[in-house]
Amino acid sequence: MQIMAELETVNTPPADTPFIRPDVRAFLDFLNTMGSTPMSALTPELARQTYLAMTSVGEREPLPLPVIRDLAAPGPACAIPLRLYDARAEREPGPVILFFHGGGFVIGDLATHHAFCTELASALDLPVVAVDYRLAPEHPFPAAPDDCEAAARWVAQNPPELGRIATGLILTGDSAGGNLAIVTARALVEQPAAVPVILQAPIYPVTDDRIDHPSFREFADGFMLTADTMSWFSNAYQPQAGHPRAYPVYNDHAQTPPTVLVTAGLDPIRDSGRVYGAELVRAGASLTFLEMSGTIHGFIQLRKAIPSAQDDIATIFAAIRQQLERI
């Protein structure tokens, strides 16, 4: 397969003085002067409420769309809530995007990523199905990947609720959702669904279980996502060390679908994404790699607080379009 690697970056100072965009710096200064209780000190339910509140303050308003409809797919343990977004009231068959939200497998839901999903559906002019998978600690690993795979297979079957529109799947998500996009794509490669996965687009995903990456040390505190919070997420999710459905870097990547991989320059899990990208290159996968320098983990939900994030997501959408044109 064709190999293509693209790096979205700027001239960056040495690691001890990382480049920080002015709007990112202002947002971090605001966060670091608030004196908020660390997420690791909260109950999961309170952490979920706090995450939703932060998103409502930092994110842009959702775009109006003619189709925003809640659905449900049969799951391995219970029905899986979904939300369908479409910029068209009627549509010919074509690709369908599945979006898996971030939040460390513990927080996040359809509401926290609602505005981004409206932007995704509008900008790419494709239907988007957001998946509200089960969360830890109530439902530890592998509940989340089980639900995401079940939802993807259901969408691929073109159920009447979706209007029989899917000819191929595009899997995307941020952070934990980026991990789930990769894991789900792999599952549907190993055991094909009714329609194929034609592209995956993980955004700042966690892909391995290493804690010795330079970015993990450099951005462990003071850049919103902290090492302490990541440990709290992991303790709740209880992933199995080295398991490819928990840490997809440990897979064979030879059959990976075309990929748009995004990292953030000031993210503690930046290097986890870089390592995954390097494995795709070694395997000969078709890869567009974008590193958004000077910004933090979570930027796709902070477009009001960090206005430059709007340009970042426009770059991501352009890369997805470019990869789709090659298919």
Image (cartoon, helix red, strand yellow):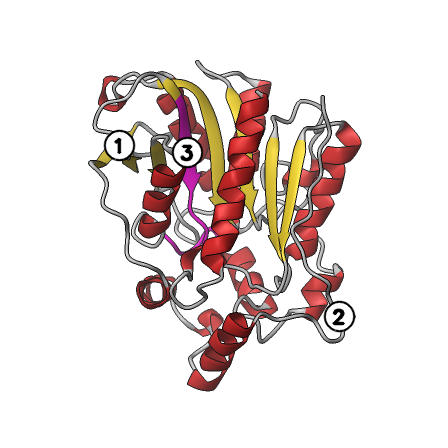
* Of the image marks 3 and 1, the number of the one nearer the N terminus: 1
Q: Residues within 10 Å of mark 2 (few under 14, many from 20)?
A: few
Q: CA distance from mark 2 to mark 3?
A: 37 Å
Q: Tell me where residue 16 appears, x and y as whole percent.
A: 76, 75
Q: Which mark is residue 72?
A: 1
> In front here: 187 or 223?
223
Residue 38 is covered by the magenta coloring: no
On screen, residue 116 above or below 19: above
- Closer to viewer: mark 3 or mark 1: 3
Q: Identify the secondary structure beneath mark 1.
A: strand
Residue 97 is covered by the magenta coloring: yes
Asked whether the viewer can see residue 142, the reply is: no
Q: CA distance from mark 2 to mark 1?
A: 48 Å
Residue pictured at 45% horizontal, 41% vertical: 144
On screen, residue 280 above or below 272: above
Asked whether the viewer can see residue 256, the reply is: yes
Q: Tell me where residue 104 appears, x and y as whole percent.
A: 49, 54
Q: Identify the secondary structure beneath mark 2.
A: loop
Q: Tell me where residue 131 appears, x and y as whole percent.
A: 36, 38
Q: To which residue does mark 2 refer?
A: 13
Bounds of the magenta span?
95-108
Quarter of the C terminus within the rendering: top right
Q: Quadrant of residue 90?
A: top left
Pointers 2 and 3 in contact (C-beta within 8 Å): no
> In front here: 158 or 180?
158
Q: To which residue does mark 3 refer?
A: 98
Task: Single out the residue that lies furthest toward the top.
Answer: 194
